[in-house]
Image: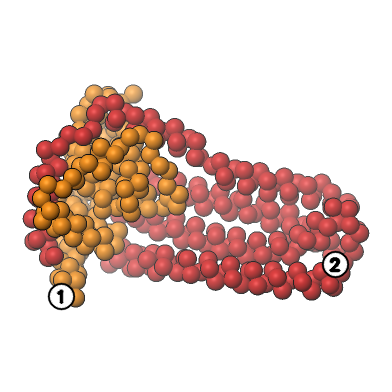
Chain colours: A red, B orange
Amino acid sequence: MELEEMQKAWAEMSAKLGKQEKLTDKLIMDMTAQKYKSRLRSLTIPETIGSVLSLVGSGWILWNFNTYDSLYLQVSAALSAIILIVLPALSMRALYGMRALKIGEDNYRQILDGHVKNRRRFINSQKMGMYLGFILLVVMLPVTLKLMGGKVTHMPARTWFWYLPTAFVFFFLFTRFVYRCYHRTTVYLDNLVKELED
Amino acid sequence: MPNERDFIRIIKENEGIIFKITIVYSRDADDQKDLYQEIVYQLWKSFDSFRNESKVSTWLYSIALNTSIAHLEKEKRTVSKVPLDRVILERMEPDDPLMEERISLLYAQIKTLNAIEKGLILLHLEGKNYNEIAAITGFTATNVGTRLGRIRQKLRDQVKK
C-alpha cells in the first residue's frame, strides 16, 4: 500500500471513528483514577522486596564479620556484602531512569532520545547484574557455609569440583540466553539513534 | 484541580484519535487497553499545564505520542481494570469487510516502521502539515519533509517486494 492509498484508508477509518461515541464521563474519570491507583501500587513492590532481602543478607554477612577467621573468608564476605548492596542499587537506578521521561514537558524527539538512553541503561544494568550475580554465586558459598555453622578455613576441593563447573555451565547458558534476548533490542536502539541523528 | 467537565469534553471529542494512536503502538488488545488508559491518565495529569499554552490538538498528540513511547519501556503489562472492551474491541466492528481488510493492511504496514517513522506517518495521515508535525515532534519542518520522503520510498519498496 503506497502513501496515497494509506491516506485514503486512514480518512475512511477516521470518518467511521468520528461517528462513534464509546466513552462515557464515568469511564473517562475511572480510567484516570484507576491508573493513578495502580501506579502507586506497582511503584516498586517486587523491586522493594528484592532490595530489602539483599540488604538484609548484606547486613547479616557484615554483622558476623568477626566470625570469619581467615583472610579468604573475610574477602569473600566483603565481596558478597558489596554485591548485595550494588545489585539492588543497580536495579533501582535503572527503574528510576525509566520513570524519568517527562511526558508532559518534552517533545517526541526528546522522549525518543530518553527512551533509547533508558533502554541502554537498563540493558547495561541487567548485564552488570548478571556478572555480579555470578561472582556472588562463587563468593557467597564459603560465607554461607561458615554462617550456617561450618568450619571453613578454605573450601574443600571436592566442593569446588562440582560447584564451580555447575556454576560455569549455568552461567554460560544463562548469558547466552540473555544476550540473545537483548541482541534485537540493541540493534533496534542503534538504528533509532542513527535515525535521530540524521 | 483540573476542570473535569472540560477534560471529559476534550477526551470525548478526540476519542477516535487516541484509539488510532493506541493501535499503532500496541501489541495486542490488552496492551491497547492499557495504553489507552495510560494516555487518558497522562492527559489528565498534564491538563492544567496545557491550558492556553497550545492548541488542544498539539497538546493531545504530543502527550499521546510521548506516552506511547514511554509505554514501550514497560516490560510487564497490567490488565486494565476499567471495562474498556466497548471502547477498544467494539470500535472496529466489521460492517464492510473490504474496508476492514484495507485498514488491517494499513496498520500492518505502519507497524513495520520504527518509532520515529510511526509518529511522523501517523501525524501526516492525520492531515497535519510539516510545521504542525515539527511543533509536536521537535524535528524541524524541513527535516520532517525529508523523513516523510524517506518513509514514502520505504513504503514503495515494501510494495515492490
Q: Amino acid at mark 2?
A: Met
Up the image or down, A158 lies above or below B37; here it is: below
Up the image or down, A152 lies above or below B17; here it is: below
Residue A130: name its quadrant: bottom right
Chain for numbered disc 1? B
Up the image or down, A176 lies above or below A25; here it is: below
For label 1, count other residues whose C-alpha is less than 10 Å away and answer few (under 14), some (14-19) or many (20+). few
- Quarter of the rendering occupied by the C terminus of chain A: bottom left
Foreground residue, A11 or B54?
A11
Does dot 1 land on a helix, a strand or a loop?
A: helix
In the rendered image, which residue does mark 1 sit on? Answer: B160
| x, y percent for residue B50 | 26, 35
- Quarter of the rendering occupied by the N terminus of chain A: bottom left
| x, y percent for residue B105 | 18, 60
Residue B60: name its quadrant: top left
Query: Could you tell me which residue is drawn at 19 percent across and 65 percent down?
Result: B151
How far separated are the C-alphas under marks 2 and 1? 66 Å
Left or right of residue A99, residue A84 in this image:
right
Does dot 2 land on a helix, a strand or a loop?
A: loop
For label 2, count other residues whose C-alpha is less than 10 Å away and answer few (under 14), some (14-19) or many (20+). some
Q: Amino acid at mark 1?
A: Lys
In the rendered image, which residue does mark 2 sit on? Answer: A155
From this viewpoint, is residue A114 visible? no
Left or right of residue B124, residue B36 in this image:
right
| x, y percent for residue B18 | 24, 43
Query: Could you tell me which residue is drawn at 63 percent across and 69 percent down?
Result: A171
